[in-house]
């Protein structure tokens, strides 16, 4: 079978499902592009595909429910399916879900909402498996399967040319070693290779997974909590592995006059903390922006349909689909590029931490 034809069919199917999802969720209500986009990019307690007949008694959710895990001092841990909230009040027992956040109902069994629609009720400790967490599990399982298979192939065929999946992964592993770790870190690169390979492939797998809507539309690295944790891993490894020269450069700054140190030391400390912030925001913003742009082009179809009629929606759909598919193809490159940039910057920070003083 022609590989390019298969890829074309997959892209077409993904966009059809995306558009169907947008159309189904709008139901008979006025289409709100902002709400639709935020619903797709934010975390959720289920893997939602579409809502049919929204706002009618026949309303049906096509989704994969995920486990809700809540803890309160009174009742301890409670586990149930997120499908329990699929009712008019989004209520199950004493819990109410409001904008994907779970609250404990008041004595009247309701939420206390202010003028802006924010709830002031107490919250249980939410340990649920959300869509983002499910995406992380899928990425981790994929990595175990892929690298387990590659490791098994090396054991079976030691010293021989790679075959199959092994031949695809080996150049990427060597690329991280020879083009990222060695030049950036130097002779001590080997101790950092496990982390660099792990973070590169995790980000890459997560980014690609987010480009396949019919799998679940996961937005793992478009979630700032995930990128913060990844950046903190790099930060803590840097400061733990930092040698005497690294800390002397921050707190003593060789070659700088003593009278200038009170100014330079705060700047160096600020620089040390700004590095993980830059790592976090760069990855988060680039991945989130890609999802928003694709969904924005799709929203144009329904916005024009609502303003000017079905003919305008159909006419705009040709251009919108073309641009959305182009952005989706571009995001495949961005998926790899952002994984590479995060890994490269991490390696550069490690290199600064372990390099010896120049004499």
Image (spheres, rainbow, N blue to C red):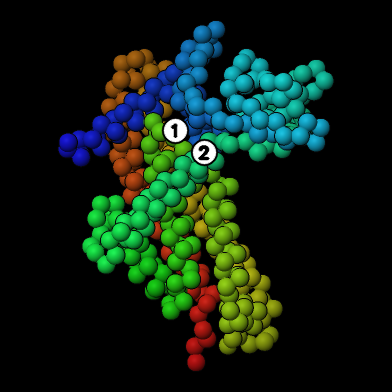
Residue 41 is situated, as x and y percent measured from the top left of the image, at 50, 36
Position of residue 6 in the picture relative to residue 184 (left or right): left
Task: Identify whether 225 is placed above or below 319.
Answer: below
In the image, farthest residue toward the front: 156
Residue at 68% in and 21% down:
92
Quadrant location of residue 107? top right
Element assignment for label 1: loop
In the picture, which quadrant includes the N terminus?
top left
Residue at 34% in and 15% down:
310
Position of residue 108 in the picture relative to residue 341 (left or right): right
Q: Is residue 240 visible?
A: yes
Residue at 62% in and 78% down:
247
Q: Are marks 2 and 1 in contact (CB under 8 Å)?
A: yes
Residue 355 is situated, as x and y percent measured from the top left of the image, at 50, 80
CA distance separating discs 2 and 1: 10 Å
State the residue position of label 1: 216
Q: Is residue 204 visible?
A: no
Task: Identify whether 73 is placed above or below 173.
Answer: above
Element assignment for label 2: helix
State the residue position of label 2: 134
Quadrant location of residue 289? top left
Task: Identify whether 194 is placed above or below 213.
Answer: below
Quadrant location of residue 44? top right
Residue 121 is situated, as x and y percent measured from the top left of the image, at 77, 29
Query: Does label 2 or label 1 sit earlier along the sequence?
Result: 2
Q: Residues within 10 Å of mark 1 (few under 14, many from 20)?
A: some
């Amino acid at each position: 079978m022609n590989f390019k034809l298969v890829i074309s069919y997959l892209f077409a199917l993904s966009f059809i499902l995306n558009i169907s999802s947008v159309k189904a969720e709008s139901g008979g209500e006025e289409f709100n592009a902002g709400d639709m986009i935020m619903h797709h990019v934010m975390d959720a307690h289920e893997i939602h595909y579409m809502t049919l007949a929204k706002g009618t008694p026949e309303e049906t959710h096509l989704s994969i429910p995920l486990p809700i895990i809540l803890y309160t001092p009174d009742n301890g841990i409670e586990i149930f399916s997120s499908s329990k909230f699929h009712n008019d009040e989004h209520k199950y027992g004493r819990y109410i879900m409001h904008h994907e956040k779970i609250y404990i109902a008041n004595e009247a069994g309701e939420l206390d909402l202010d003028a802006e629609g924010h709830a002031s009720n107490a919250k249980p400790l939410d340990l649920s498996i959300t869509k983002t967490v499910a995406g992380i599990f899928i990425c981790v399982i994929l990595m175990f399967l892929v690298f387990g298979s590659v490791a098994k192939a090396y054991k079976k065929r030691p010293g021989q040319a790679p075959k199959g999946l092994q031949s695809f992964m080996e150049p990427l592993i060597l690329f991280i070693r020879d083009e990222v770790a060695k030049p950036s870190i130097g002779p001590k690169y080997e101790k950092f290779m496990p982390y660099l390979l792990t973070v590169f492939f995790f980000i890459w797998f997560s980014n690609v997974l987010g480009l396949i809507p019919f799998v679940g539309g996961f937005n793992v690295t478009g979630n700032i909590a995930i990128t913060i944790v990844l950046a903190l891993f790099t930060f803590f490894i840097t400061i733990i592995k930092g040698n005497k020269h690294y800390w002397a450069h921050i707190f003593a700054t060789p070659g700088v006059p003593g009278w200038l140190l009170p100014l330079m030391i705060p700047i160096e400390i600020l620089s040390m903390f700004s590095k993980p912030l830059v790592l976090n925001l760069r990855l988060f913003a680039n991945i989130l922006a890609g999802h928003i742009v694709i969904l924005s082009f799709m929203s144009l179809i329904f916005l024009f349909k609502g303003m000017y009629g079905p003919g305008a929606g159909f006419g705009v759909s040709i251009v919108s689909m073309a641009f959305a598919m182009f952005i989706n193809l571009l995001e495949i490159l961005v998926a790899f590029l952002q994984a590479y940039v995060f890994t490269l910057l991490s390696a550069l920070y490690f290199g600064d931490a372990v390099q010896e003083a120049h004499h």
